[in-house]
Image (tube, rainbow, N blue to C red):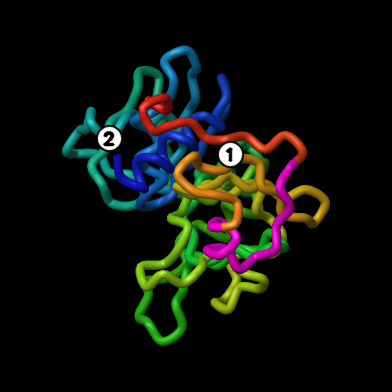
C-alpha cells in the first residue's frame, strides 16, 4: 500500500453518516473508494454535483472538479457552478478534504501556488476552507525533496488563515485545538523522535496518543 492510498483510507474514517463532503483535486478524490459500507455521505463537487460516486464506477460523459471521469449515485443532483458555490459559501458542506503544499502550526494552509511556478489559479479552495464546517488536509508528510511540509510558518502564499481542522499524512494525524497543534495518532512505522525530525512545526502529543495499526487494518 503506497502513502497516498494509506492517507485516503485514513481520511475516509473521519467521515460520518449524513455528511456532505467535498473532495479536492488529486489525492482527496481517492477517499471516495474507501468509504465504509455502513455510512452514507453525499459527495459534492464545485463544478455542479451533489452525489458523486466512486471513481471506479465512472460515466465518460461526467467529470468532477478535477476533470476526471466520475460516476453518480441514485438521487444525485446537477446544477450550475453559481448554485454550487452558494452551497459552499452558505456553510452547507460539512467536510472538505484538500491537498496541501504547506500547513503550519497555527492551522494556516498554503495549497494553491508555488512562487515562481506557473499555476492555473486557486480554484475553489479559498471558498471551501472558508465555508466548510471542517477542513481536513490530506497530504504526504514531506515534499519530494524531503523537506517538511508541516512548518512553523507557511512560506508560500496562504490559502486560508487558521482554518485547518485536521492534517492526515501517511505518518500521523494532527488536529488544531485552541491555536495549538496536537498529535492525535502516529504510525506504527515511526517513532515519536523520528516524527519530530521530519516535522518542523511544533506539536504536542495528546494524552491518549493512538498508534496507527498496520495498513491491512485500514482496509
Q: Residue at x 39, y 33 (%)?
A: 215
Which quadrant holds residue 31?
top left
Q: Position of residue 88 (x, y in %)?
A: 58, 45
Give the camera-side residue of 219 and 138: 219
Report the residue marked by disc 1: 95
Magenta residues span 194-206
Categorize mark 1 by other alpha carbons within 10 Å: few (<14), some (14-19), many (20+). many
Above/below status of 16 relative to 59: above
Which quadrant holds residue 30?
top left
Above/below status of 123 relative to 39: below
Reading the chain from its start, which is encountered first: label 1 or label 2? 2
Q: Quadrant of the N terminus?
A: top left
Q: Is residue 99 magenta?
A: no
Secondary structure of the residue carrying tag 1 is strand
Residue at the far top in the pictured view: 38
Q: Quadrant of the C terminus?
A: top left
Report the residue marked by disc 2: 55
Amino acid at each position: 500500500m503506497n502513502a497516498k492510498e494509506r492517507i485516503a483510507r485514513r481520511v475516509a474514517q473521519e467521515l460520518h453518516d449524513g455528511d456532505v463532503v467535498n473532495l479536492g483535486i488529486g489525492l482527496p478524490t481517492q477517499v471516495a473508494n474507501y468509504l465504509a459500507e455502513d455510512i452514507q455521505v453525499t459527495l459534492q463537487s464545485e463544478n455542479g454535483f451533489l452525489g458523486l460516486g466512486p471513481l471506479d464506477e465512472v460515466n465518460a460523459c461526467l467529470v468532477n472538479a478535477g476533470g476526471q471521469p466520475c460516476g453518480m449515485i441514485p438521487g444525485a443532483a446537477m446544477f450550475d457552478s453559481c448554485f454550487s458555490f452558494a452551497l459552499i459559501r452558505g456553510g452547507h458542506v460539512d467536510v472538505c478534504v484538500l491537498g496541501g503544499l504547506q500547513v503550519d502550526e497555527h492551522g494556516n494552509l498554503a495549497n494553491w501556488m508555488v512562487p515562481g511556478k506557473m499555476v492555473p489559479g486557486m480554484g475553489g479552495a479559498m471558498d471551501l476552507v472558508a465555508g466548510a464546517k471542517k477542513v481536513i488536509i490530506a497530504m504526504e508528510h514531506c515534499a519530494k525533496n524531503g523537506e517538511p511540509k508541516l512548518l512553523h510558518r507557511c512560506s508560500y502564499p496562504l490559502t486560508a488563515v487558521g482554518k485547518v481542522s485536521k492534517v492526515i499524512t501517511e505518518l500521523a494525524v494532527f488536529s488544531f485545538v485552541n491555536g495549538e497543534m496536537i498529535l492525535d495518532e502516529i504510525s506504527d512505522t515511526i517513532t515519536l523522535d523520528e516524527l519530530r525530525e521530519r516535522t518542523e512545526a511544533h506539536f504536542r502529543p495528546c494524552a491518549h496518543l493512538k498508534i496507527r495499526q498496520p495498513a491491512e487494518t485500514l482496509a
